[in-house]
Image (tube, grey):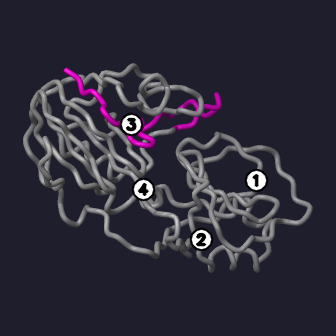
Amino acid sequence: MYIELIQAGSYTTIQDKGRTGLAHLGVPMSGYMDEYSANLANWMVGNQLGAGLLEMTWTGVEFICHTTCSMALAGAEFECFVNGQSIRLDKTIQLNSGDHFKMGRLLIGVRAYMAFAGSFAVPLLGESMSTLSVAKLGGHSGRALKTGDVLNLKRPGLTVVKHKPLWKKIKPQSIHVLRAMPGPEVDHFTPTSIRQALGQAYQITHDSNRQGFRLSADPITAPNNFSMSSSGLVAGSLQVTPDGQTILAMKDAQTTGGYPRILVVNHDQLSQMAQIRPGEDIYFFVSSN
């Protein structure tokens, strides 16, 4: 009752809703980068929201199924094949023992989510199976998956086929506007710096991962003679380094930081952030309400 990976992809990990209540011990929440898409994949196979699944970044997986099971994909879209035949991804996929599943070319987005009915038989750490690879915790031996890994399914079997609503699919776009709120240290920045932070376009650089996205934009003038003690850091915090560069903390970010935070991206916008590609323009919008 398992799947056997033939190709594991460039960075595939087991993630769930993440672990809470451990930040005081220095353990990040981790969990889905795109919670919206992960919840959709779990819904399509009848899992509880927050259940464990595979998060794949930039490239997909290829595996042999050694049981009968139901599977679904959401988030980034790939060309996919079962036993060499192209398949549709807008509904639950039913697999039989011996079936060969392969993900091919990436079409839209960055991160895809693959849920199996019943989820995985993986030990929990802090009531979560999320992988925190920087600390070698959780998931499959605390690391990204490798070719040859075997993943045991907790309760394999077929479920009712559900269809993915068209309006829930990722839409290709080159400009993104994300809601945010003023950061804890915003008052230490000049009005000119704040206007710049809200008026300019940012782009994700290739020096980005689950810990944080380094953004490319005109440097923001950091506060003069400003120093701060290391304080709590949450996903979505836009930090400004002494040289004016910006780093957006993400799900595996350290739990404390010492750079001033000019903005904090709303939690419900992080799913969109997780699917933005380098080269696409990002603007931050702070509501007056």
Residues shaded magenta: 1-29
Within-10-Å neighbours for mark 2: few <14, some 14–19, many 20+: many
Residue sitting at x 62%, y 55%: 237
Residue at the outermost right position: 225
Residue 195 horizontal/vertical position (percent): 69, 79
- Look at label 4 and name its amino acid: Ser
Mark 4 and mark 3 in contact (Cβ < 8 Å)?
A: no
Residue under circle 2? 202
**Dot 2: element:** loop
Measure the alpha-carbon separation of dots 2 and 1: 18 Å
Nearer the camera: disc 4 or disc 2: 2
Along the line of sight, the residue nearer the viewer: 238 or 82: 82
Within-10-Å neighbours for mark 4: few <14, some 14–19, many 20+: some
Closer to the chain start, of discs 4 and 2, is 2
**Dot 1: element:** loop
**Does residue 228 appear left or right of residue 6 in this picture?**
right
Residue 41 horizontal/vertical position (percent): 25, 46
Closer to the chain start, of discs 2 and 1, is 2
Which quarter of the picture shows residue 186?
Answer: bottom right
- When the figure is inspected, residue 176 is found, relative to residue 135, above or below; the finding is below
Q: Is residue 289 visible?
A: no
- Look at label 3 and name its amino acid: Asp
Residue sitting at x 39%, y 41%: 9
- When the figure is inspected, residue 21 is found, relative to residue 178, above or below; the finding is above
User: In the rendered view of the protein, which quadrant contains the N terminus?
Assistant: top left
Residue under circle 4? 271
Along the line of sight, the residue nearer the viewer: 98 or 134: 98
Say the numbered circle drawn on residue 16.
3
Closer to the chain start, of discs 3 and 1, is 3
Residue 286 horizontal/vertical position (percent): 57, 72
Residue under circle 1? 259
